[in-house]
């Protein structure tokens, strides 16, 4: 027998062993159902273009009678999870397989977002950054940030009194203020104080570049080596512009915070607490780099989420005035008319608590969770999940499952009330979709929930929110349209903020 024949037999035997082994592991399991694609491009033409892919994915699931769906776009397998059971079984219970991120060249590499742990692939660096961050934002640790949240909320109320027509800008500024004060320990009075232009540019770039299929370089990473002067590479210059903004977002607030700490003028903050936790006998260069990068992730992950939820609250109060009146009646009964609520009142305000929970369910800040990736083949419910698949949890479908939440398109805080108390037996939205899943669940969720709760109940206690009217006295109906790739915030709309009484205005001004 010749060497070539022997070698061929050995290779064939090895190949047969691998195939049989794989067959045993997967049983040649079929792929999950999904829309039938085309050669080469797969389901590229099936991708929803109406700005609401989460609704389309749910309809596909109903058509195929499956909560797990398969797509393939230009060779990239994508698995869509439309139910809490599927998310819980895979991302929660098999988190060792489903905790990484797909590497998007444009966002993670060219724009610099891969330096921050919410966007990092799973690994040692991700674990180190997340551990550092989580330590400072446990349910107990976030209590020390209450003063900043109270101060910024009082400032917001005063601005709503003074210039109610600018309410949208006031809400955006307040969301940034509370993040900046907690992350970096300095007071923010205007957008300029928090490097608003730089941060807005970085976040705007992220929302654009994170859209599926936005840039060909994500499909063909080799394109990143094409010179920026080459025709058709305007995206290279755009990436450089956004990348510079991301770098400044990381560097500038951190430098200002260190200057304030050195001068003794900084408020207690994540930066100051994290530095205090360092061992002075060690080389902390890498730890200090991680502090800087994790602090930057707070603004990128926190401010847009908070503003999206508060905008959702404003829309809900316009569309459901009876809910607003019921919440205000509870506030008046518990804390007294013309008074402002405090964190200590939370447990005594079950209807307000249910209202906030319904905000997270009705219009979640992120309808689709940031994608995951698995580097190992898996089998679930008899379906094969290929290695290298992008995993896309459909949080909107989970939070709008009519079997769990009847009349899911309606805003009904009562669904979370039983016998006059807050009841979350049907599924707490903050645990099944609002803050992500598994090892990637948002570690800043407790701080975020505190900010949203205080902002919402403070506005309810002091303001009446109604539809705006045009020059002819006709009410203006908000469109309710959302925008964004990662965080889905409402487009600006007109409405009316009016103080509930002269007395509450005096209280607001006294606190501002």
Image (spheres, helix red, strand yellow):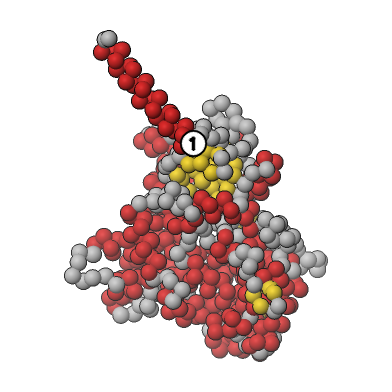
Badge 1 is on which residue? 26
Residue 121 visible to the viewer: yes
| Relative to 313, 231 lies left or right | left
Task: Give the image location of residue 486, x and y in percent.
Answer: 53, 53
Task: Give the image location of residue 378, x and y in percent.
Answer: 48, 41
The crowding category of the residue bearing disc 1, from other C-alpha atoms within 10 Å (few below 14, some 14 to 19, many at least 20), is some
Q: Of residues 185 and 168, which is closer to you in this image?
A: 185
| Image position of 258 with respect to 365: above or below | below
For numbered disc 1, what is the local secondary structure? helix
What is the residue that sits farthest to the top in this orientation? 1
Residue 499 visible to the viewer: no
Q: Quadrant of the N terminus?
A: top left
What is the residue that sits farthest to the left in this orientation? 281
Task: Give the image location of residue 435, x and y in percent.
Answer: 53, 61
| Relative to 145, 310 lies left or right | right
Residue at position x 54%, y 77% in the image: 153
Q: Of residues 40 and 306, which is closer to you in this image?
A: 40
| Image position of 343 with respect to 408: above or below | below
Q: Of residues 150 and 335, which is closer to you in this image?
A: 335
Residue 401 falls in which quadrant of the image?
A: bottom right
Residue at position x 52%, y 58% in the image: 436
Task: Give the image location of residue 245, x and y in percent.
Answer: 41, 55
| Image position of 324 with respect to 242: above or below | below
Residue at position x 63%, y 80% in the image: 349
| Relative to 332, 140 lies left or right | left
| Relative to 388, 33 lies left or right | right
Residue at position x 39%, y 71% in the image: 136
| Image position of 260 with respect to 483: above or below | below
């Amino acid at each position: 027998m010749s060497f070539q024949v022997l070698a061929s037999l050995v290779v064939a035997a090895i190949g047969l062993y691998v195939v049989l082994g794989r067959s045993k592991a997967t049983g040649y399991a079929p792929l999950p159902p999904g829309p039938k694609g085309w050669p080469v491009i797969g389901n590229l033409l099936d991708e929803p273009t109406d700005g609401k892919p989460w609704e389309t994915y749910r309809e596909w699931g109903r058509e195929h009678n499956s909560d797990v769906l398969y797509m393939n776009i230009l060779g990239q397998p994508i698995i869509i999870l439309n139910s809490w059971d599927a998310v819980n079984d895979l991302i929660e219970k098999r988190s060792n397989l489903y905790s990484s991120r797909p590497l998007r060249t444009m966002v993670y590499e060219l724009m610099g977002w891969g330096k921050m742990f919410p966007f990092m692939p799973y690994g040692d660096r991700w674990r180190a950054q997340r551990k550092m961050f989580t330590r400072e934002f446990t349910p107990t640790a976030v209590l020390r940030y209450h003063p900043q949240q109270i101060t910024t909320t009082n400032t917001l109320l005063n601005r709503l009194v003074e210039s109610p027509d600018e309410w949208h800008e006031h809400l955006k500024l307040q969301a940034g203020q509370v993040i900046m004060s907690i992350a970096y320990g300095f007071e923010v009075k205007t957008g300029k104080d928090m490097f608003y232009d730089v941060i807005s540019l970085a976040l705007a770039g992220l929302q654009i570049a994170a859209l599926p299929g936005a840039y060909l370089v994500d499909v063909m990473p080799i394109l990143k080596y094409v010179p920026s002067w080459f025709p058709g590479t305007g995206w290279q210059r755009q990436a450089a512009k956004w990348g510079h903004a991301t770098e400044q977002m990381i560097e500038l607030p951190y430098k200002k915070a260190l200057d304030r700490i050195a001068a003794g003028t900084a408020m207690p903050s994540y930066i100051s607490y994290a530095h205090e936790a360092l061992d002075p006998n060690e080389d902390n260069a890498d730890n200090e780099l991680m502090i800087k990068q994790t602090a930057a992730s707070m603004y990128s992950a926190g401010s847009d989420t908070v503003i999206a939820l508060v905008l959702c609250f404003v829309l809900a109060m316009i569309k459901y005035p009876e809910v607003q009146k019921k919440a205000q009646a509870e506030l008046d009964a518990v804390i007294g008319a013309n008074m402002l609520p405090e964190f200590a009142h939370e447990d005594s305000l079950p209807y307000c608590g249910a209202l906030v929970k319904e905000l997270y369910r009705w219009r979640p800040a992120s309808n689709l969770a940031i994608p995951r990736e698995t580097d190992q083949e898996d089998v679930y419910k008899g379906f094969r999940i290929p290695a290298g698949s992008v995993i896309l949890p459909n949080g909107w479908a989970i939070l709008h499952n009519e079997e769990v939440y009847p009349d899911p398109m309606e805003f009904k805080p009562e669904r979370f009330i039983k016998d006059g108390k807050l009841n979350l037996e049907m599924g707490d939205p903050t645990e099944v979709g609002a803050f992500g899943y598994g090892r990637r669940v948002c570690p800043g969720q407790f701080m975020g929930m505190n900010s949203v709760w205080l902002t919402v109940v403070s506005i309810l206690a002091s303001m009446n929110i109604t539809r705006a009217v045009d020059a002819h006295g006709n009410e203006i109906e908000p469109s309710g349209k959302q925008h964004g790739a990662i965080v889905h915030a409402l487009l600006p709309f007109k409405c009316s903020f009016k103080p509930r009484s002269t007395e509450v205005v005096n209280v607001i001004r006294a606190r501002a």
